[in-house]
């Protein structure tokens, strides 16, 4: 059936999109376009259920509702991946924040304990692709 | 070979650690209180500069570090071993005179003789990165299933094959200064080991593997990561952050 081909292709495309490297702007824009398209198609499907059924028949699915269900599963998967990636970005920022706090505190503690510790000026790395800025100066 | 190096030469038996003044040992710590203090004291006897990164332990691990002469960095929340390693490196690499960075597990499974031998290799200028491997000579000490899975992990990683590594997930590593400056571990959890290997595979650094042995004690066994965690690692590595 045609629908099987379409669904498998959609799932594979999603997997591919989420594991390859690409520009953030491009990815973000495509996600938003996909979201708007999905919403528009849904509105259309609600307004003209008969058209939907016709399309479903064409693809080898019995009813229009079933087609919507299939589309929902694919959209859900894409949404999950997207959320996961978003979460990773947040996690990275959170890590940098925690690391900065930890090192700042450690400098104070270790100095009080009588250990020499140089000062890290900044550990923030933005996207994590640049080296942190550090100072070579020793604080005694 | 670990036994090849004269103890005098590796500095293991020398009482004053002057010789290893340029070495910083980074120990990520998460709930290791029962053994931590003795492990840190043993390390301090050989390497004078130790930084323990407490990854939000709730069992008094931080207090154990404070009783020793090691530097302590404390994550306010639990972030994961990869994050702890990176924090330790970030802290250590600005310390004056730091040239060599050793990553060392807190559960005492590594042998200091191995670490010292690896630092000597790095010092000789033969390699920029020295990794410990469990499989060169002492393979028998590693439990069978663990051995198979770890071998598979290396074979599955393109970087591991390229570098001809035999063990990608050993906690004992020595990085020279330029490598430590450049390395940026972004995998907070256990995937950092694979991340480091794939970074090394892409880079121009000369990587050497040195045979080490692991003490699989009752304690380190109970602390060791479950092999199922490999699934998590694979997932984290394949779905990276991309916008």
Image (cartoon, coloured by chain):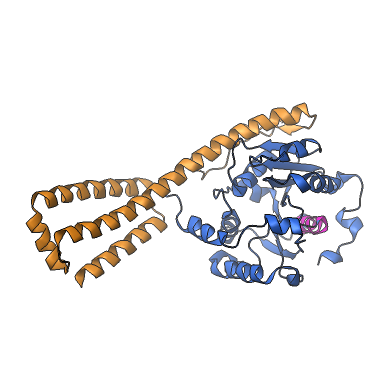
Chain A's colour? orange
Q: Position of residue B74 (x, y in %)?
A: 66, 36
Residue B35 visible somewhere in the drawing: yes
B1 within the magenta span: no
| In the image: residue B33, left or right of residue B161 | right
Q: Main structural element of the magenta stretch: helix, strand or loop?
A: helix
Quadrant of the rendered image containing residue A137: top right
Q: Position of residue A83 (x, y in %)?
A: 38, 47
**Residue nearest the observer in this picture, A4 or B121:** A4
Q: Residue at x 41, y 45 (%)?
A: A86
Q: Position of residue B199 (x, y in %)?
A: 57, 56
Q: Residue at x 25, y 47 (%)?
A: A35
Q: Residue at x 76, y 70 (%)?
A: B138
Magenta part of the chain: B112-122
Quick check: B183 above or below B214?
Answer: above
Q: Residue at x 28, y 62 (%)?
A: A10
B121 within the magenta span: yes
Residue B243 visible somewhere in the drawing: no
Q: Position of residue B166 (x, y in %)?
A: 66, 69
| In the image: residue B61, left or right of residue A50 | right
**Residue nearest the observer in this picture, B100 or B229:** B229
Chain ID, blue in image: B
Check the picture and name the quadrant holding the N terminus of chain B: bottom right
């Amino acid at each position: 059936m045609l629908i099987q081909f379409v669904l498998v292709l959609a799932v594979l495309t999603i997997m591919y999109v989420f594991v390859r490297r690409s520009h953030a702007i491009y990815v973000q824009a495509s996600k938003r376009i996909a979201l708007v398209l999905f919403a528009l198609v849904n509105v259309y499907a609600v307004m003209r259920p008969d058209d939907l059924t016709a399309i479903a028949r064409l693809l080898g699915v019995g009813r229009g509702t079933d087609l919507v269900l299939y589309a929902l599963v694919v959209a859900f998967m894409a949404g999950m991946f997207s959320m996961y990636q978003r979460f990773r970005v947040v996690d990275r920022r959170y890590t940098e924040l925690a690391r900065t706090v930890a090192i700042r505190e450690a400098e104070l503690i270790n100095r009080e304990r009588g250990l020499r510790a140089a000062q890290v000026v900044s550990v923030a790395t933005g996207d994590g692709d640049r080296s942190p800025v550090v100072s070579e100066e020793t604080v005694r | 070979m670990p036994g090849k190096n004269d103890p005098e030469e590796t500095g293991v038996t020398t009482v004053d650690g002057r010789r290893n003044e340029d070495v910083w040992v980074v120990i990520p710590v998460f709930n290791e209180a029962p053994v931590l203090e003795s492990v840190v004291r043993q390390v301090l006897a050989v390497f004078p500069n130790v930084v323990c990164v407490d990854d939000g332990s709730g069992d008094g691990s931080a207090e154990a570090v404070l009783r020793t002469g090691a530097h302590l960095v404390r994550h306010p929340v639990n972030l994961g071993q990869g994050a702890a390693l990176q924090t330790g490196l970030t802290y250590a690499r600005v310390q004056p005179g730091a040239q060599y960075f050793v990553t060392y597990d807190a559960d005492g499974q590594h042998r200091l003789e191995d670490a010292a031998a690896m630092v000597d290799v790095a010092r000789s200028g033969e390699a920029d990165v020295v990794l410990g491997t469990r499989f060169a000579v002492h393979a028998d000490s590693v439990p069978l299933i663990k051995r198979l899975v770890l071998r598979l992990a290396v074979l599955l990683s393109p970087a591991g094959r390229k570098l001809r590594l035999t063990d990608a997930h050993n906690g004992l590593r020595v990085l020279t200064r330029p490598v430590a400056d450049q390395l940026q571990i972004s995998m907070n959890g256990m995937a950092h080991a694979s991340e480091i290997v794939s970074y090394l595979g892409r880079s121009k650094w000369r990587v050497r593997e040195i045979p080490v042995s692991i003490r699989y004690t009752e304690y380190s066994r109970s602390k060791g990561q479950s092999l199922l965690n490999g699934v998590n690692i694979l997932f984290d590595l394949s779905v990276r952050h991309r916008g």
